[in-house]
Image (tube, rainbow, N blue to C red):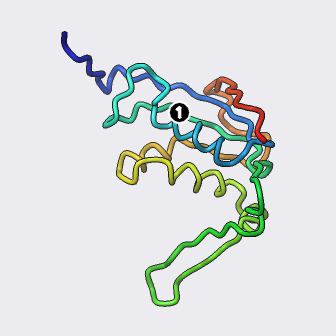
Amino acid sequence: MKTYNVRASEIQKDWWLIDASEKTLGRLATEIARILRGKHKPTFTPHLDMGDFVVIVNAEKVAVTGNKERQKIYRKHSGYPGGMRETKLSEMRSKHPDRIIQEAVKGMLPHTSLGRAQIKKLKIYSGAEHPHEAQQPKELTLGQGK
C-alpha cells in the first residue's frame, strides 16, 4: 500500500469565525493553532501549509484565569543593551488587545518559515466587526470558556 501525499494544488483553505468573548486564552489559542496548522484535516501533512484562515472577533473580551491579569508579563528585546521592554497583560489589553491572542497562538506554531506563513492567516479584531464578510467565514463554536 502506498502512502498518500497531498499536493499543494489540492489544498483547500476555508475561513472560520471565532468569537473570543469569555473564552479562556490558552484553550482558545490551542484550537486556533490547530486550525492554522491544518491538524483538523484528515490529509494533514506536517511540512505543508495545510491550515485554514481564522478570523477572531471580540479579542478584548478574552478571559484569563488566576492572577494573570496583574502578573503576566510580555517581554521583548530590541537587541541593544538595555533594550528590554516589559508590558503587563492589563496594559496590553488596554493598548493592543489583539496582540494577547496573537502572542499566545504564535508560541504554539512552529518557529520556522512555515510558522511565519501560518500566523499570517490569523486575523484578529478587538470589536465585533470584521472586513471579511466576502469570504463567508463559517462560525466555529468552542467550549464554554471558564
Residue 37, picture quadrant: top left
- Residue 73: x and y in percent read 65, 70
The N terminus lies in which quarter of the figure? top left
At a point 79% along the width and 64% down the height, the residue shown is 94
Q: Quadrant of residue 118?
A: top left
Taking the view exactly as shown, the residue that stands out farthest to the bottom is 81
Disc 1: CA contacts within 10 A as few (<14), some (14-19) or many (>=20): many
Secondary element type, mark 1:
helix
Q: Residue furthest front?
A: 66
Amino acid bearing label 1: Ile
Seen at 52% across and 35% down, the residue is 34
Q: Is residue 82 left or right of residue 55?
A: left
Please tell me which residue lies in front, 18 or 133.
18
Q: The C terminus lies in which quarter of the figure?
A: top right
Picture coordinates of residue 140, whole percent (x, y): 67, 27
Q: Which residue is mark 1?
A: 35
Relative to 103, is 70 above or below? below
Task: State left or right for residue 25 relative to residue 13.
Answer: right
Residue 117 or residue 22, whichever sits in front: 22
Q: Residue at x 50, y 26 (%)?
A: 40
Residue 46 position in % (x across, y down): 34, 35
Q: Nearer the viewer, residue 59 or 128?
A: 59
Percent across and percent down for residue 53 are 54, 34
Which residue sits at x=53%, y=41%?
Answer: 33
